[in-house]
Structures are given as structure tokens and as C-alpha cells.
Amino acid sequence: TQVAIVPVAESHKEYAKELSDKLIDINADSEIYAKNDSLNKRIRTAEKTRVPMIIVVGDEEIANKTVAVRDRRTREQYNLSQEEFLKLIQTKINEVNF
């Protein structure tokens, strides 16, 4: 799995699925972490599985059509628009070592 998508609440799952579908379109492997655990536990679970990118999706991200990115390699957290994020993932896939 290259990208873990963590919806904050039940109502955010649809947007998470939409992002997942877009990632599939560019041949990126993604997984939605939507179990009944707390948000922190789902993020920790994704971190433990050593997924390179974790995306947290909440009300703000849905309203602005953005994604909150946690990059495991650079240990940074930042927000990107959907298009910027998909371009970033495409670039990383093209680098092959992603």
C-alpha cells in the first residue's frame, strides 16, 4: 500500500472512497482505514504498517477539495489540493522507489 486514507468520521468515507478511486486511476495502491477505532489509533495503525503517505480527510478537506498529507519519509504534514496531491503521487510512482 502506497497511500493510507484515514477518514475522520463516518460522513467522510465517501470522499475517502472518491480519493481512492482517483488513486486507482493513476495505478497507486491505496487503502481506506475506516475501522471503528479512534482517529489516533487508525493513524497509528497506518504508521505502523509503514505506509509512505497517510492522508487524513475531514470536513475542511471535503469543503476545500484538499487532502491533509502526512509524509512518513520527510516526517512532514501539509495540505495539498486534490490535483497537486495526485500529481505528487504520480511523480513518486514514476520514480519507481515509492
Image (cartoon, grey):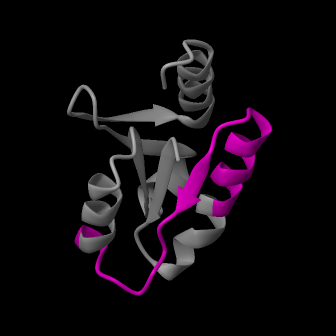
Residue 79 lies within the magenta run: no
Residue at coordinates 59% horizontally, 36% vertically from top-left?
Answer: 82
Q: Nearer the viewer, residue 97 or 78?
A: 97
Q: Within the image, what quadrant is residue 73 found in?
A: top left
Question: Quick one: which residue is furthest to the bottom in this view?
Answer: 36
Instruction: In the rendered view, tell whether residue 70 sits above or below residue 74.
Output: below
Q: Nearer the viewer, residue 5 or 58?
A: 5
Q: Nearer the viewer, residue 11 or 51?
A: 51
Residue 19 in the image, given as x and y percentages of width and height: 64, 50
Question: Quick one: which residue is furthest to the right in this view?
Answer: 25
Residue 8 in the image, given as x and y percentages of width and height: 40, 69
Residue 77 in the image, given as x and y percentages of width and height: 26, 37
Residue 32 lies within the magenta run: yes
Residue 25 as seen in the image, left or right of residue 66: right
Q: Within the image, what quadrant is residue 31 found in?
A: bottom right
Residue at coordinates 59% horizontally, 50% vertically from top-left?
Answer: 30
Residue 24 as seen in the image, left or right of residue 16: right
Instruction: In the rendered view, tell whether residue 37 sits above or below residue 21.
Output: below
Instruction: In the rendered view, tell whether residue 94 sits above or below residue 48.
Output: above
Q: Provide the residue span drawn in magenta.
A: 17-40
Residue 55 in the image, given as x and y percentages of width and height: 43, 49
